Image (cartoon, rainbow, N blue to C red):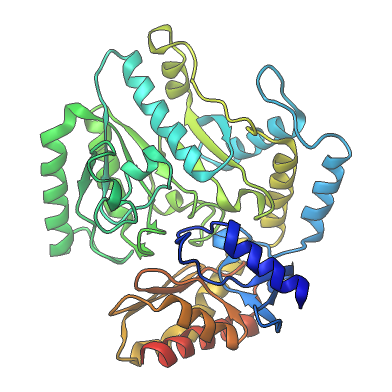
Amino acid sequence: MGDLGRLFALDQAHVWHPYSSASDPGVPCLAESAAGVRLALRLRDGSAVEAIDAMSSWWCAIHGYAVPELDAAAQRQLGRMSHVMFGGLTHEPAVALAERLVGLTPEALQRVFFADSGSVAVEVAMKMALQLHVGRGARRTRFFTIRGGYHGDTFSPMSVTDPVGGMHSLFTGILPEHLFAPAPPAGVDVADDDPAMVEWERATRRLYAAHADEVAAVIVEPVLQGAGGMRFYSPYAVRVLASLAREHGALVIFDEIATGFGRTGTLFAMEQVGVVPDIMCLGKALTGGYLTLSAVLCTREVAEGVSSERAGGALMHGPTFMANPLACSIALASLDLLQANDFRSQVAALQAGLTRGLAPATGLSSVREVRVLGGVGVIQLREPVRVAQVTASALQRGVWVRPFRDLVYTMPPFVTGPDDVSAIGEALVGAVRDVHG
């Protein structure tokens, strides 16, 4: 207990956790190990807790933990080299992963730029769009998106994240000001002739028309807005946004960092939309949660435009750990496993189980809405969630969750079995009932 107490004390004194106050830090749980879909946690009082991970470690550990195939890929690559710079050098894992990603995505996406996080991937995508227009001799410096989105915590992604409802309102007046259409009507099944959709489209087209010559690109998370509010919305709205971009000479950027690799039921959410973007961002589940890696795919036209002499002759970006061979090797094994495990069936089973398991929350007075899409289940409250209390209540039931805003949600690993999915539903509903009534 002495060592444990010292560990927690050092954490409190020196470690700054995400989205937390350094002057008034919370008390985290200590993760000691992880296997399958379970975390072995230690609480500050020394008690041990085993919990189902309902979060996939922020949506990336789609195969769970201590995965033999991914462990083996890491060990094989460690015997060769763990890292080498990518400037002036290449290596087989990066080339093979680029080939695989090009093969998995639409034919138009032919170039792959590797980065080291989802946020950096969005930075790169936005830089590509801006640099392309410089090469075309056009001064287009603004991005067009919709309210409710989230694209990352670094500077450029913050600027296209919802400036009011998002988490970056503190930086209003400092960030570049981009263009935000209203959030589309909620729900993937909203018809294109629904009055709310018609009104949304009218307002969106009006806003775009007023700024068409300024817009470098439209950027959206197709179908599912993740950290901006776990909102599901119609593929038709994405098609409207893409058509506006293409009618007026702008690019289309899809941020599939959260939605990619099966989370919404298809390999990529764009498959539900019927639009091929000019630039696509991937991350999170790319390595199955083992190492940080992201990728930006683009068309030959974009790559050649950015590489033109007038545009500077090169994409001026190069992360130190770009195309890390260890991460690329694990990503290849993760993609193999995704196919071998039939992720579509896995996610369909998650959707069915979460729909059943979360349904009782609809009867709670504190609950505004319950919604499920693919491997995403959401209980939206009528008030801000009491994060610490809900987390503790779910943990007492053997489930690890991390709520935010007014949302108690889950994105379990794809390998989560039916009994564990049921346990997640019971824990989330029970925690909401206990804490919010």
The residue at the point 56 percent across, 72 percent down is 27
So how many labels did they put on this image? 0
The answer to whether 164 appears left or right of 434 in the picture is left
**Quadrant position of residue 320:** top right
Above-or-below relation of 43 to 128: below
The quadrant where residue 414 appears: bottom right
Q: Quadrant of residue 94?
A: top right
- In the image, farthest residue toward the top: 309
Of the pair 323 and 252, the residue shown nearer to us: 323
Please indicate, yes or no, whether residue 107 appears anywhere in the rendered image.
no
The image position of residue 62, as x and y in percent, is 63, 61
Tell me if I can see residue 118 in this picture.
Answer: yes
On the rendered image, what quadrant is the N terminus found in? Answer: bottom right
Where does residue 249 sit, x and y in percent of width and height?
26, 26
Q: Is residue 197 left or right of residue 39?
A: left
Residue at 48% from the left image edge and 23% from the top image edge: 300
Residue 122, percent from left and from top: 44, 39
Q: Nearer the viewer, residue 151 or 389?
A: 389
Q: Nearer the viewer, residue 318 or 243?
A: 318
In-front residue for pair 348/120: 120
**Residue 258 position (above or below residue 353):** above
Where residue 274 appears, x then y in whole percent? 39, 47
Which quarter of the rendering shows the C terminus?
Answer: bottom left
Question: Residue at (74%, 49%) from the top-left corner?
Answer: 333
Image vertical order of residue 396 relative to residue 414, above or below = below
